[in-house]
Image (cartoon, rainbow, N blue to C red):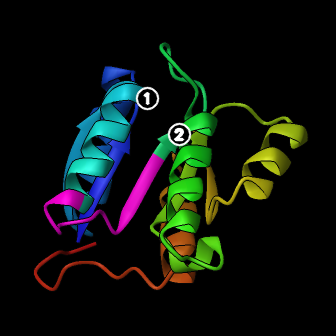
Amino acid sequence: MRILIVEDEELIIKVMNKTFSFYGECEIAKNSKEAMMLYLAGIEKNTPFGLILLDIALSSGSGLSVLKQIRKREKKAGAKSHKEGVKIIMTTGNRKESVVKESIASGCNGYLLKPLNPKMVKEILQKLKITPLKNSDS
């Protein structure tokens, strides 16, 4: 499975890449424009991402706007709900309930607070039926 990590902080990128590489091949986008470019390129090449980890507060652009653009595109393509599209987990250090509610209302499949808690990562991935690669020790 291809995994897109959308994050602009280098240390967090390293941690997320190491954590999620047990589940698939990770690619990195550091801003919303790059995220959309990689997402669309994957669809065009018939190698779509199975999971997107999307930081809500990017230094250049909003992760929430990327989420909305992806869900809008999927709806145009015939998806009846966000459950039929790519799995998107929002990541943030923001613990405000309003931010969580807006992400869920916009169609995310899950929500992880930073710093990442390995137990929570495993739980959300199990809920989304994403399993580690066969040769991983995760």
Q: Which residues are magenta?
A: 44-53
Q: Residue furthest top?
A: 59
Give the Cα distance between marks 1 and 2: 6 Å
Whether label 1 touches label 2, CB < 8 Å: yes
In the displayed structure, does residue 27 sit left or right of residue 65?
left
Name the residue type under label 2: Val
In the displayed structure, does residue 126 sit left or right of residue 90?
left
In magenta segment, residue 77: no
Name the residue type under label 1: Ser
In the displayed structure, does residue 18 sit left or right of residue 104?
left
Q: Residues within 10 Å of mark 1 (few under 14, many from 20)?
A: many
Instruction: Tell me which secondary structure the magenta stretch mostly adopts.
Output: loop
Which image quadrant: the C terminus?
bottom left
Kindly identify the residue that appears in the image at 59 percent across and 25 percent down. Answer: 57
Which percent across, then down, holds residue 137?
20, 75
Question: Can I make out residue 67 in this image?
Answer: yes
Kindly identify the residue that appears in the image at 53 percent across and 80 percent down. Answer: 84
Q: Nearer the viewer, residue 12 or 60?
A: 60
In magenta segment, residue 50: yes
Question: Can I make out residue 119 in this image?
Answer: no
Kindly identify the residue that appears in the image at 57 percent across and 81 percent down. Answer: 127
Q: Tell me the element at label 2.
A: helix
Q: Which residue is mark 2?
A: 66
Which percent across, then down, holds residue 28?
25, 38
Asked if 40 appears above or below 138 in the picture, the reply is above
Q: Nearer the viewer, residue 113 or 119?
A: 113
